Image (cartoon, coloured by chain):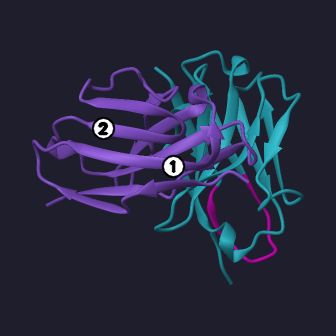
Amino acid sequence: EMVLTQSPGTLSLSPGERATLSCKASQSVNSGYLAWYQQKPGQAPRLLIYGASSRATGIPDRFSGSGSGTDFTLTISKLETEDFAVYYCQQYGSSPLYTFGQGTKLEIK
Amino acid sequence: EVQLLESGGGLVQPGGSLRLSCAASGFTFSGYVMSWVRQAPGKGLEVVSSITGGSDYTYYARSVRGRFTISRDNSKNTLYLQMNSLRGDDTAVYFCAQRGSGWAFDYWGQGTLVTVSS
């Protein structure tokens, strides 16, 4: 069964800094089926990245995704105040058909 | 503009039933896979169920298989989730989500809260 493990659990950074979030899969993931979401308190998740590295519509270019196989990364090049939130990775295709990571909380230092 | 509006949540006793609805607009509803994703209080995300545009294929998480039924009415642009034999661990916000051509969940509703408690 596919498991996605995100690290770190919490990341404390300051605005203007660079954030690097990791998502490791227990089995190889088809890169076309790896996505990243942002969720703020009381809101629905918002799609940031699909296909491991393609930005969704309207997503600023400070967000970028990379990786393949079992190791994937979401990078936020220069943090803005509105970027502090919880981030989830998600895969499609392996059993179970859909899997989310447990999330990384990005908090203001 | 894509809009997804869930309804039907509420408080229900263990063993009870509830039917969620998701009214969709702003896109060709029948052309998209639709899903229900839930989030227990303070927890992460779980895809509960998914259905293809023509209702020919459905998916259920192991945790709800045999208790929940997903369906859709393309003439009404509405997605449903019939939830039976509800348990305390079904307590969550239930989101309706559209799966886009990139296989990810492009659009989400704001969610409806289901609380299972006596």
Name the residue located 15 percent from the left edge and 45 percent from the top edge.
A81
At 19% from the left edge and 42% from the top edge, which residue is drawn? A18
Is residue A88 or residue B59 the one in the foreground? Answer: A88
Q: Circle 2 is placed at which residue position?
A: A75
Kindly identify which residue carries mark 1: A24
Q: Of the numbered discs in the image, which one, if any, rests on residue A92?
A: none
Characterize the local packing of mark 1: few (<14), some (14-19) or many (20 or more) Cα atoms within 10 angstroms.
Answer: many
On screen, B52 above or below B15? above
**Which quadrant would residue B28 be assigned to in this image?**
top right
Q: Which chain is purple?
A: A
Q: What color is chain B drawn in? A: cyan
| Residues rendered magenta in the picture | B9-19
Q: Chain of mark 2?
A: A
Residue nearest the viewer, comparing B4 with A104: A104
- Tell me which label, 2 or 1, sits earlier in the chain: 1
Q: Describe residue B77's horizontal placement relative to residue B42 as left or right.
A: right
